[in-house]
Image (tube, rainbow, N blue to C red):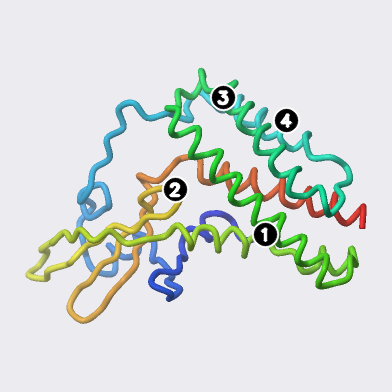
Amino acid sequence: MPAPFILLMQLTLDGQPQKFIPLATFRSQRDLPLEFALAYFEPKEWQGLGSLDGSREALPIVRQRVLAAVPQTVHLTELIPQVQALTDCFHRELAAINRQIGLREVEVEFAVAGFADVMQSVAYNLIQLSHTYRHDPAQIKNQFDFSTLYQNWLDASARVSSTRHSYLHQDVTYQIQIVYNAYGRVGLKVAVADEVYYVFDPALACPAANYMFDLCSIVAQSLCVALTLNV
C-alpha cells in the first residue's frame, strides 16, 4: 500500500491525473530561491488552530480504541450501521483527548466527517465486492483496494484556487495558483512560459494527514477481514 506521502503527491484536477513534483526538486530545477514556497504566496494564520504537539500519547490511544470497536465478524447487512458506530466512537475519543490538542469544534467535526466519508466508501465497496464475487472471501480480500478508495476521496476534494499570484525571478514570470485537497493547501500550480507544473508543498497542510490515513487504512482492513470471516 502506498504511503500517504505518495498519495498526496498525485491528484486528479479538472478530470486529469496530475503528479506533483517535490518543492525542493522544482526549486533546484529552476534555480529558484528558498522563499519560493506556498507560504510565501498565501501565509497561514496559525493562531487559534489545534496542534499535534501534545498528542503524541493521546492519538495512538484513539487509534487503539477505534480499532478495538471493530467487531470480529460483521454481516453484510450490518456494514453501514457499523461504520456509523465507528464514526461515533472516533468522535467520542477525539473529543475526549481534545484538551491535549486544542482543536476548534469545527476542526473536530471536519476530522469526523472525513473519517465518515472514507469509511462509508469502504463499506459500499465491500458490499459491491461481496455481490460481485458471490460472497467469496478470498476474492473480496484480493479485490479490496483501500489505496484506490482513499485516492478517490482525495481527488473528489481537490481544487485549484482561482486567485493567481505572479512571481518574477531572473526575468521569468511564474503564475501561481494554490492547490487544495481535504487536508488544506498541499501544493502549487505553476505556469511558466507554455508549461504547467504541479508542485507538492504540504508545509501548511493539516498535520494529521498521515495519522488519518493510517487510522482509516487499518480500520478499513479490519472491516474487510471481519466481513470475510462472516460471509
The residue at the point 69 percent across, 56 percent down is 122
In this picture, is 43 found above or below 152?
A: above
The residue at the point 59 percent across, 58 percent down is 150
Frontmost of labels 3 and 1 is 3
Residue type, mark 1 in image? Phe
Checking the image for residue 95, the label placed there is 3
In this picture, is 101 found above or below 113?
A: above
In the rendered picture of this protein, how many numbered marks are placed on residues?
Answer: 4
The residue at the point 43 percent across, 33 percent down is 106
Residue type, mark 4 in image? Arg
Secondary element type, mark 2: loop
Secondary element type, mark 3: helix
| Sequence-first disc among 3 and 4 | 4
| Sequence-first disc among 3 and 1 | 3
Decide: few, some or many residues near mark 2? Use Cα within 10 Å; few <14, some 14-19, many ≥20: many
The residue at the point 25 percent across, 67 percent down is 190
Secondary element type, mark 1: helix
Checking the image for residue 57, the label placed there is none
